[in-house]
Amino acid sequence: MIIIHVMSTSQKLLPRSIAPAIRAAMRTMPVVVVTGARQTGKSTLVHHLLPGARMRYLTLDDYDTLDRIRREPAALLQARWPVVIDEVQRAPGVLVAVKREVDRGRRPGRFLLTGSANLALLKSVSESLAGRAAYFDLHPLTVSEIAGHGGTGPWEQLLSDPGRFKAPGRHLDDLPNRLFRGGFPGAALVRGDAHRRLWLDGYVRTYLERDLRDVSSVADLADFRRLMRMAALRTGAMVNQTELSRDAGLLQPTVHRYLNLLEATCLIHRVPGFAVNRTKRLIRTPRLFWCDTGLASHLAGVESPLELRGSGMGGFLLENLVLLDLLAWSEARTPRPAICYWRTATGEEVDFVVETAGKVIPIEIKTSQKPSLHDARHLQTFMSEYGNSSPFGLLLHNGTELERIAERVWAVPLGTALGL
């Protein structure tokens, strides 16, 4: 499908936090690349990034367009208006043609490319578009975006000086339901758990039966789906491929390959251990999280918010939700902050560590409404270990009070931290 048209601004759209950063990049770079899992809203976002502007829109989900762009890319890429190529990972060879066009005329905003196969795409980009492109990841809707605020949590202020942050304390209401519905627009914005389950089931089927083919062949889809379930049940856990291999009944090399495919198609995130070693022996095995808490719940076999409440997954999914908000926030910043976790060989741990502006800020997440000094003990251990580079820590909780509960430890309500 090849479309050259004037976009209407009348269609309602939930504002996305990443949109201003992408617009800014399009004013300075000839190519902008937006990647992310299927159904995060990439195509919708693209259609609203160019309001009132002419553009050539090529979707490679259309087989005629895919065939033409493989055979005669130059003819389709030459245009007076911006060229949008949707699902570009389906024809990675076209990036060479994009490079040629950019080298002929390096005006800003010539190409906007989207893809749902991050690593496969970026490998080709690194070879073809070095120095010519800006890159962004689009995550599912954040809590703030679902509420219509179009942002993320106020991490800029919280990670700068929480003592000066002034905002109402808001708890995260109806937590099991929020975690169960996730942030995919097709699931988060529909009413009823039954509709949500149908949507997610269709999402997984489409992913297994079609999207995997864009990056690799999988001989046994039943094996792959079983691995997905085992990984979902380990949301927030350190990646243990030996254990996954045993429980999924697969060889370790197969587990390794399947995890790489899940990461390549933007469905999982592996959060690394904090690498700076001072006096303690650290665990550096990455932790596994999903691109969406609703998808993780579905893959784990959780069928309702009530079932989620008793599943034992709630705390890990809450950490997953906070991670996704941090990732969405970091996408709009330059340079992008590093997000890690911290754990020692003796069991001391902090959920996340954000490296930004020369500081390392530890973050601990609790579901309770009344944080205690006991909850802050590992934050204090971390800050003691890293001294001046870690001036304070954040303890996120589900109460309503934003206050200092210990020396250099600030308790922040989850609703406030996530931008409600």
Image (spheres, rainbow, N blue to C red):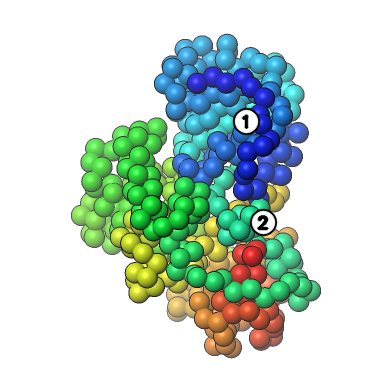
Q: Vertically, is 392 above or below 238?
A: below
202 in relation to 124, above or below? below
Give percent across and percent down for residue 283. Answer: 46, 68
Q: Quadrant of residue 370?
A: bottom right
Q: How many residues crowd around disc 2 within 10 Å: few (fewer than 14), some, or many (20 or more)?
A: some
Residue tagged 2: 149
The residue wearing badge 1 is 112
In this view, the residue in front, 256 or 420, is 420
Q: Which amino acid, mark 1?
A: Leu
Image coordinates of residue 350 in percent, x first then y, are 53, 73
The quarter of the picture where residue 396 lies is bottom right
The amino acid at mark 2 is His
Instruction: Kindly identify the residue that appears in the image at 54 percent across and 88 percent down.
Output: 374
Where residue 251 appears, as percent x and y from the top left, is 23, 50
- At x 55% / y 82%, what residue is drawn? 369
**What secondary structure is marked by label 2?**
loop
Q: Is 89 positioned to the left or the right of 134 in the image?
A: left
